[in-house]
Image (cartoon, coloured by chain):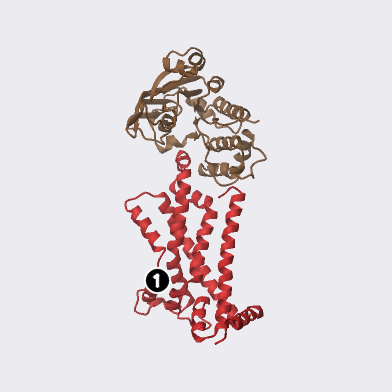
Chain colours: A red, B brown
Amino acid sequence: MQDMSEALGLAIALIASGDADLREIVALSLYVSLSATLFSCLIGIPAGALLAVMRFPGRGALVTLVNALMGLPPVVVGLIVYLALSRSGPLGFLGLLYTPSAMIVAQTVLIAPIVTALSRQTLEDLHTEYDETFRSLCLTRLQVMGALIRDGRFALVTAALAGFGRAVAEVGAVMIVGGNIDHLTRVMTTAIALETSKGELALALSLGIVLMAIALGINALVQSVRSGAARGSYA
Amino acid sequence: MPDDVLPAHARLQAAAARADDPRRLNARGIALSLAGRRVLDGIDLTLGPRGVTAIMGPNGAGKSLLLRVLHGLVTPDAGEVRWGGQPLSLAVRRRQALVFQTPVLLRRSAAANVDFVLRARGRDLSARDGLLRLVGLDGRGATPARRLSGGEQQRLALARVLAAEPDVLMLDEPTASLDPASVLAIEDVVARTARAGTRVLIVTHDAGQARRLADDVVFLNAGRVVETGPADRVLRSPGSDAARAYLSGRLVLPETPSETPRS
């Protein structure tokens, strides 16, 4: 067990030396969470646009449900996806459990509601503004949704980044469906949990620093997207 | 400036004599209540296929609402709107365009705003530059639409609806709160659009604008048509008390003291 300052020194040295284990873990984390973000956007943005534009019975309840799903506990998502992917589960034949693909599925389930709910809110506000103009132009629903997504693109990037931030920082879901297997499914958060419990604070802390840097980077990116949008009066 | 980008129109010239000309309006018994208040009260309106009609009247008279009913954006409680003998179907409405008092432009460049409508109507994008030139925005195509001045935004809104090649162009106080140069620029395009064959209906508070643009005037008060006639006659010597009071600048009090919706 090292003390705090010693661990911090080792952690910085580890990052500076470009340690192979560290790089591998960071790379897998980014691969899993970016993939989950991509799939969540492919699902969540069209779903958000549909909810923003369509009026049907039960829509209010559906919006409430999607909003509630934003707060899904990662361990519960992990458990549900584990049950679905385990050998006796409905998707067991895919043989995905304890692979990065299973982790992508779990994180997609976790953050798709976030991307959907944030997209719905953004696009509905935009739709309220554009509605009369679009109805006057007699656009089809598909044209309306396409125009809303394109004009809401900066806010949608923010929604995607919010989803990515949640995915890359969660530990419960990837731990359960990935198993934290060295060189296979070990990502930053599961590695931090493991190394801390082993007392290997240097690696844990160096991963923590990288994770915090990513979180800060996401915030900076959101800020610059927002100010870029405002500069072009596209916000 | 070239007029060849304007909609029209051997087709419209040929249609003018026919009863099914899509520019012929026949509205019967239009009535609408909002929040318990009668805002349109049995409006009958027949308009021929050519020219510019100014819809005038005090705030709360129902002018903007009538325009929306005629375009099918608002469904009346009673009455029927027919264009060229046809009820307001999607096909009829697609041949019409409405310019709003406050333009809602897409969060894109000026050119992309015009392209959007050209694409939606399946037209070639090569028409874009001519339309921007028509409204005096040539060279501004790459500017974000919402960075344009108020007058430029309204001209862009006009170019955008003209991209749909409408048979009927409706304008809801398009020059309210614009400077005189922008007003004249917009009036010029509207006048040329009308000369090219498009039927124009314009809601305006500006008697000068009605005089400059309109062939005839429909005067509304408290949700009713109180006077119609040739513009120079109605504007010079109005026959109704309400129009006389309005045009002479005297206050016309609403019949019921309640919140009045935007006219």
- Name which quarter of the figure residue A220 lies in: bottom right
Q: Quadrant of the C terminus of chain B?
A: top left
Query: Badge 1 sits on which subunit?
Result: A
Q: Position of residue A121 (x, y in %)?
A: 45, 53
- Name which quarter of the figure residue B209 lies in: top right
Mark 1 is on which residue type? Val
Residue B148 or residue B253, whichever sits in front: B253
Q: Is residue B99 above or below residue A235?
A: above
> In this orientation, does residue B224 appear?
yes
Q: Position of residue A231 (x, y in %)?
A: 62, 50
Residue A81 or residue B180, whichever sits in front: B180
Give the secondary structure at mark 1: helix
Residue drawn at 61 percent across, 54 percent down: A228
> In this orientation, does residue A96 appear?
no
The residue singled out by tag 1 in the image is A77
Q: Is residue B183 above or below residue A36?
A: above
Q: Is residue B97 above or below residue A231?
A: above
